[in-house]
Each structure stands twice: as structure tokens, then as C-alpha cells.
Image: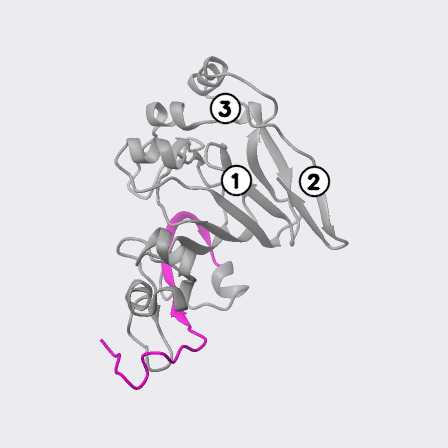
Amino acid sequence: MLFNESNMNSLYPLKFHPVFKDKLWGGDKIKTVLGLDYGNLPNCGEAWVISGYSDNVSVVQNGFLQGNDLNELISIYMGDLVGDSVYEQFGDEFPLLLKFIDAHDWLSIQVHPDDELAQKRQMPNGKTEMWYILQADKDAKLITGFKEKIDSETYLKYLIENKLPEILNYETVDAGDVFFLPAGRVHATGPGILLAEIQQSSDATYRIYDWDRIDDAGKKRELHTSDALDAIDYSIPIQPAMPLQKTERQRW
């Protein structure tokens, strides 16, 4: 620990070391567009830039607090760092996880449980998230929800017949677009998209479709078909884009 009585109350702008993740679908935009050096990773799909989650807690890289992790700082500075109401609710764990995501290929189609279901399944909390599009190649698309309201039987029929992508809603994206993804919404990011993700501090993810691809070991990745059935909200409507500014759009 690097704290002492003379500097205990001296907070300053903190910088953290990113945690880089090698992903089957990752690319190189985290380096070429954002200028972050992820070393020799072959396919850097994610940079966790602020995290209090599990064994990926962010570590300070500047100033006298260098070397201390985010949750350690919260335990010392408490509400002075995160606000009194946040500290009262979440204690020493930072409640958000901020990432950069670079999709060179489609991510798996997935869904996240809400807090109630996650806790019923012995997970701390569910996962609601938001995407802010930083850069997008021409005609890049992502998936958010279904084309129309369906039921679990229809969903299973298309899934079993390997036709799930046919009933999903696709959005063509531009830099500046914002997408809110509540827990329960089926979603996926498509190739050519670099985005910032702000989410609950959770890794509760159910993979439901992976485009029939195989990993470097020649195997398909695990799917979570049964677990996802109760997590999916089949009634989420698709709502139109709403203007934020002349150069930005928001889709809820």
C-alpha cells in the first residue's frame, strides 16, 4: 500500500492500466484507432479501461497512488471517490465496467440476465449495458432485439433450425450512435465496429448463437441455450431513432 497520512485526502485525475483481452473476433483498431498498445495479442477484441470486477481490477498508473487498484482506493476514499450514495449501495466494489470493443467479425449473439435472475443463479448481479459507437466501417451493422414480438416457442424453433439471425433486428451504425441494451435483450456487434461499452460490473453472459464458427483448436464455443431461455425478454419492442444533436443519434 502506498498511502500515508500526508496524502490520504489528496485525490487527483487517475489513470489506469488497461486490461487487454484476446478474442476470436477481435481486430487491431484498439491499437490503430485508439493508440493503445496491447503487445503481441493476435486479436485484441477488448480493452477493459476501468474495472473493479473479479481478477481484472484496474490498477493506477500515475501519481503517488500508482500500483494501487481501484477497489483499494474505494475502501480508503469511500464516498469521496465515488459519491456517498454509490458507496452506501455498492461498498468497496466499483459498480461499472468500462470497455473498448473492436469487432473484426461478428460477436456471438448473446443475452444477459437481469439482477433477479442472476442472483437466483448465484451470480452477484445481472448485466445491463450501453454502447457508444466510436468508429464504424461503411454499412457496419449490429443486432439489437427481435424484428417483432415473439414467444419462446418461436425463438426455439428458429434456433433449432439454425435460422435465428432471420428473426433479429439489424441496425446500420455510424460514429456517435448510442444503443441502450437492457438485460434480457438479445444482441450482437457486427464486423467493422469500434465502440465504448458501459455496463454493470458483471460477466453474466449467455451465448445463444455463434455463427457456426470454430476456435483455434478446431472446436465450437460453448452455447448456453437452456440458461438463456429464462433470461430473454421476448416482448422488448423496437423503438425508432431519436435525435440527440445534428451529428448524433440515440436508439433505445
Above or below residue 83? Residue 243 is above
> Magenta region's main secondary structure?
loop
Q: Residues within 10 Å of mark 1 (few under 14, many from 20)?
A: many
**Element type at mark 2:** loop
Residue identifier under label 1: 181
Residue 249 falls left or right of residue 29: right
Can residue 142 be seen from the camera position used here? Answer: yes
Q: Residues within 10 Å of mark 3 (few under 14, many from 20)?
A: some
Residue identifier under label 3: 164
Above or below residue 26? Residue 211 is above
Residue sitting farthest toward the bottom: 6
**Element type at mark 3:** helix
Which percent across, then down, holds residue 49? 42, 62
Say which of 178 and 223 sits in front: 178
Which percent across, then down, holds residue 139? 66, 44
Say which of 108 and 243 sits in front: 243
Q: Earlier in the sequence, mark 2 or mark 3?
A: 3
Q: Disc 2 vs disc 3: which is toward the camera? A: 2
In the image, the segment drawn in magenta is: 1-28
**Element type at mark 1:** strand
Query: The C terminus appears in which quarter of the rendering?
Result: top right
Can residue 48 be seen from the camera position used here? Answer: no
Q: CA distance from mark 2 to mark 3?
A: 24 Å
Query: What residue is drawn where x is 36% and y is 78%?
Result: 9
Query: What residue is drawn where x is 29% and y is 39%?
Result: 123
Residue 32 falls left or right of residue 49: right
Q: Earlier in the sequence, mark 3 or mark 1?
A: 3
Residue identifier under label 2: 241
- Looking at the picture, which amino acid does disc 2 mark? Ala
Residue 167 falls left or right of residue 109: right
Q: CA distance from mark 3 to mark 1?
A: 19 Å
Residue sitting farthest toward the right: 246
